[in-house]
Each structure stands twice: as C-alpha cells, then as structure tokens.
Image (cartoon, coloured by chain):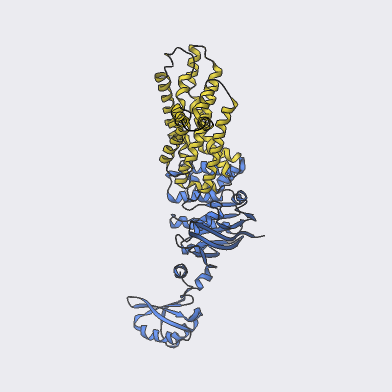
C-alpha cells in the first residue's frame, strides 16, 4: 500500500505542477456556479437546498472528469515513463490504484471547493444538511466511477484526445441507460428483466437516489462495483499492452 | 552463488515476428556484459523481459535466484534498470524524481537522503537537482536516468544504451562509474558503440535477428577479425615494391595490401594466415633486406569488422 501512496503523491504533484489542476478547478467552479444559479435558479426557487447544483453535477462531470482521467495512462505510454514505472517494484494493482486514488482525491478537492454554496444556503435558510452530505457523498462516488472508466479508456491509448472523447462517450452511455429515451427503446421488445438490468446500470438512477437523501447500500455498492470492475479492467489492459 | 543473472531460453514473439529467439546465458558477479547488435536485433526487447517490463513468450530470466515470470517484484527489487532513451517524468526535478523512486523502493528517512545524495554525486548531477527534468540537456537527462537506476545500490544493473547522447567527457565519466561499480555487481549494458565494449566490458554478446551469434571477451571477438595479428607498416614510398616482395616471401603471410599513400610514405597491411603471430618474422625479414621501416605494429583485430560480419551473415 505504501507504493500505491507514493504513486498517488507523485500523480497529485503532477496535477498541481502543471496548470491543469488550476484550470480544472476554476472551470469546474465557474460552471457549477452558472448551472446552479442561472439554469438551476438556486436563489429564485426559494428553497434552501443544493438540488440545483447536484442536479447538474453528472452533466458537468461528463466532460470534466474525462479531462482529469485522460492523462493517467496515455501520457505515461506516450512519454515512455510507463517502462520506468512498471520496472520499479510496483504491482500492477498498486500502480492502477495509486493513479486512480490521486485522480479521485483531486476530483474530491474540486468538489469540496463548492462549500461556499453550502454555507450560503445555510445562511439564507434552513436546509436539510443530511441530504446535502449525502449529495456530496453521491457526487464523490460518481466522480470515482467516472474516473475509473476514464482511466480504463486512457490505459488503452497513447493519445490523450482519444482517451477524452472515448471516455466521455462511454460515461454518457452509462448515464443514458436510465433515461426514458433508452428505456422505451428496450421496453417494446425486451423482457422486463432486461429493461430493469439496463436501468440498473445507469449512473443517474443510483445518483438521484443518493442525492434525494436516501442512502441505500445498494446504490453505494453499485458505484463501488463500477470502480472495482473498471480498475480491474485497467490492470488487465496495462499488463497486456505494456510493450505496445 | 555468484551466478546472479541467468537467462534461460528467453523468447519473445510479436505476432508472427520473433524479436528474441531462444537466448540463454549466465552472468556472474564482477562481469560487465556488453550486449551488442544492430538496431532491431532484439537487445531492448531482451532487456525489457529481464527487467520484468515485457512478459516472455517462453523461457525466463532468473535474477538472484528469482524467476522474473513468477516473482517479478523480487526481481525488480534487485535490479536497477535504465530503459532505452531514459524516459523520465519531465515535470519533476531530479530531486523529486529520486525521492519518488526512493519511496517506491521503500527507502525512507536518513537512508533515503543518503541514497539520493550518493547517487547524485556519483553521477555528477548535484547542481541540477532542483531544475525541472524537462529543461535539462540530453546528457543530464541520461545521467538522471542512471542515478535513478543506481539509487538503491542494486546487485544487478541493466542499462540500455547508457552513454547514448552524452559528449565524450560524459561518456568517459559514465564508463568510469561502470568500471567502479563492476567489482561487486552484475552489469549488463547494451550499446552499438564498439569502443565502449573495449573500454568497459569484460564480456560481449552479439545478437542478430534475435539470436546470439557470438559470446566471448572483447579480445575473443577481436581474434575473429581478419586483421587479428596482421602487421601494419609504414615506410618510404621508394621502398614500396621491394618491401612488398620481401614481406610476401615470409612464410605465414597470406597477402599484403597497400592501404594508403600519404606523400612520400606508404602504409601496408600484411594479413597473416589463420591469424598466426608473424610480426617477428616480418621485422626480421625486413631487417635482413635492409629496408628501413618507420612504424610497425601488430593489429589486435577490429571489432567493427567482426561485428559487421557476424550481424550481416544471415
């Protein structure tokens, strides 16, 4: 575990020594502000909650999380440093987990920096802080599963742009599977079991449940499983494609 | 056991292409093995398999008794490895990079500080320790790569083209360092610089198209040269015909070739039959014929010639 943490520290430092971290955080917070206040009408709706912010979060993450994840492996592959890293006494699991953890911590820092909105709603009214904490937890878990997918895509290419575009597309598919649009496409011909299965893979369905304040262990397990499955897939790809 | 590195039937195929074809050899402590071969011969692929980066298609490498295919972490702990081209995290400073490598290798506290400062001073990068690696010259990058490989004082050092991109002074420094470390370690370097084999290696393996085509000391390899024990002479041009006839008459001489003329002087090379020592006979014959020779020397053989013959014979 020590080696995972050493890798995480290096990755986090890499985020913050390049402008990437600051650009990301500024854009993330600015877009959060725009969506929550302008589109979500955080002030106008007269309710002391953070629903407008968390309602748009999955859509912001759709574009911003692949931007964090795209460099995780593609950059190492392109620069050749993958060979340096993978000839150190580091297991593939430690390398994959360490990199993922760094990206997740970074996404967590960005999410935590929305705290002024939390303070504002508490100042203006009397929100249900339990729901807000659950929402932050849901947002953080969702960021983790997006990152696991984005990291997996990044491990398959040496091109960061491709990693970004494909990563966003895969995440989009996972989001959409719960929407009526997709559901109705299946409902006509597929048995209910299949329709439910497709729905059960949707990020939005599980996320909405948590954001409403219902912390169901099954929703948590869903996100943790997605992270686990994609980290495992990343390990397989890193092992198979080391020399390529 | 001093048999620290043992390679057994190592093979790597990429699709239908065989990059490394069933190579086996052992290296003992105190040996510096030069891995020679033209570009694309499979040197880098072989080194990547020994270092645990690539998985062999078949065969394996044992490092200090550990099998790289089943216990890669134990192998990686014992190896210091410089990948081809010395890839490094360019956004870090050498100091940060070496600290990261120390963390991963489980060095901490005073041991870590000591390891970093020793490696930095051995390879002479102390004054660039706090500059981003991306801004350093090619020579410094290469040296940071070597510092990274020797940081944990490994028993086995595998360096893929350690002096590539260095100027002659830096090359000399690196070769000196390799010679210093040679006594207590196993060192494998790949190179295509033949003078490097002569100056640092105690043994050379030549590979071509994935196969070992020669394995011996640099002197052994030189002995395979046509020039081995040939005699080079320099004398006045006016004596050229007489000298040529005299030398050709010496028994054991295969042929005499006039290699060049500069001004009033000519240079000859007298090849001996099957590499026997003929210099004494040649000089005695010339003396009795009263021919003044300006320079005479026995050739040891030319590695580049041997290299070319070994690696182009298909």
Residue drawn at (47%, 46%), measured in percent from left and top?
A77
Is residue B185 among what the camera can see?
no
Quarter holding residue B104 = top right
**Where is residue A54 drawn, in percent x and y?**
48, 23
A129 or B76: nearer the viewer: A129
Query: Please, is residue A238 above or below residue A195 in the view?
Result: below
**Where is residue B30 drawn, in percent x and y?**
60, 61
User: In which quadrant is the N terminus of chain B drawn?
Assistant: bottom right
Quarter holding residue B241 = bottom left
Determine the colour of chain A.
yellow
Tell me the blue chain. Answer: B
**Where is residue A18 drawn, in percent x and y?**
44, 36
Q: How many marks?
A: 0
Query: Left or right: where does residue A71 sit relative to residue A131?
Result: left
Query: Left or right: where does residue B104 sit relative to residue A172?
Result: right
Query: Please, is residue B91 above or below residue B58 in the view?
Result: above
């Amino acid at each position: 575990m020590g080696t995972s943490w050493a890798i995480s520290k290096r990755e986090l430092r890499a985020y913050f020594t390049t402008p990437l971290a600051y650009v990301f955080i500024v854009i993330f917070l600015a877009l959060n502000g725009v969506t929550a206040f302008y589109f979500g009408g955080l002030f106008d709706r007269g309710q002391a909650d953070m629903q407008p912010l968390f309602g748009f979060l999955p859509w912001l993450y759709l574009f911003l999380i692949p931007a964090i994840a795209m460099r995780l492996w593609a950059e190492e592959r392109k620069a050749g440093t993958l060979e340096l890293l993978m000839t150190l006494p580091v297991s593939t699991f430690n390398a994959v987990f360490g990199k993922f953890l760094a990206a997740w911590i970074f996404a967590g820092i960005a999410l935590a920096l929305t705290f002024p909105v939390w303070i504002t709603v508490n100042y203006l009214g009397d929100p249900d802080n339990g729901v807000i904490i659950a929402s932050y937890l849901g947002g953080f878990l969702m960021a983790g599963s997006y990152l696991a997918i984005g990291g997996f895509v990044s491990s398959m290419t040496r091109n960061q742009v491709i990693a970004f575009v494909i990563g966003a597309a895969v995440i989009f598919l996972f989001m959409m599977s719960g929407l009526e649009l997709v559901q109705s496409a299946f409902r006509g011909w597929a048995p209910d079991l299949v329709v439910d299965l497709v729905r059960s893979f949707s990020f939005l369905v599980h996320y909405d449940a948590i954001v409403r304040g219902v912390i169901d262990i099954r929703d948590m397990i869903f996100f943790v499983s997605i992270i686990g499955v994609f980290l495992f897939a990343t390990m397989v790809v890193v092992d198979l494609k080391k020399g390529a | 056991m001093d048999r620290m590195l043992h390679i057994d039937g190592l093979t790597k195929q990429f699709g239908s292409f065989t990059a490394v074809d069933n190579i086996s050899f052992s290296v003992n402590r105190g040996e510096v093995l030069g891995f020679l071969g033209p570009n694309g011969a499979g040197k880098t692929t072989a080194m990547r398999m020994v270092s645990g980066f690539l998985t062999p298609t078949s065969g394996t490498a044992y490092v200090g008794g550990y099998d790289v295919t089943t216990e890669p972490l134990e192998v990686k702990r014992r190896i210091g490895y410089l990948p081809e081209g010395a890839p490094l995290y360019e956004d870090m400073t050498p100091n940060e990079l070496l600290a990261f490598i120390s963390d991963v290798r489980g060095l901490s506290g005073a041991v870590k500080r000591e390891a970093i400062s020793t490696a930095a001073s051995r390879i002479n990068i102390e004054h660039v320790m706090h500059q981003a690696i991306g801004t350093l010259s090619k020579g410094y990058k290469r040296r940071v790569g070597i510092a990274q490989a020797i940081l944990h004082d490994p028993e086995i050092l595998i360096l893929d083209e350690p002096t590539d991109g260095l100027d002659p002074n830096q090359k000399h420094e690196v070769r000196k360092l390799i010679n210093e470390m040679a006594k207590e370690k196993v060192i494998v370097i790949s190179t295509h610089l033949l003078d490097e084999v002569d100056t640092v290696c105690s043994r050379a393996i030549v590979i071509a198209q994935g196969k070992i085509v020669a394995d011996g000391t640099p002197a052994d390899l030189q002995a395979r040269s046509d020039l081995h024990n040939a005699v080079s002479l320099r004398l006045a041009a006016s004596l050229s015909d007489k000298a040529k006839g005299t030398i050709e008459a010496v028994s054991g001489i295969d042929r005499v070739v006039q290699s060049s003329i500069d001004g009033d002087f000519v240079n000859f090379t007298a090849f001996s039959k099957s590499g026997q020592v003929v210099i004494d006979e040649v000089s005695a014959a010339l003396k009795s014929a009263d021919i003044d020779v300006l320079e005479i020397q026995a050739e040891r053989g030319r590695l580049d010639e041997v290299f070319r013959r070994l690696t182009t014979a298909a």
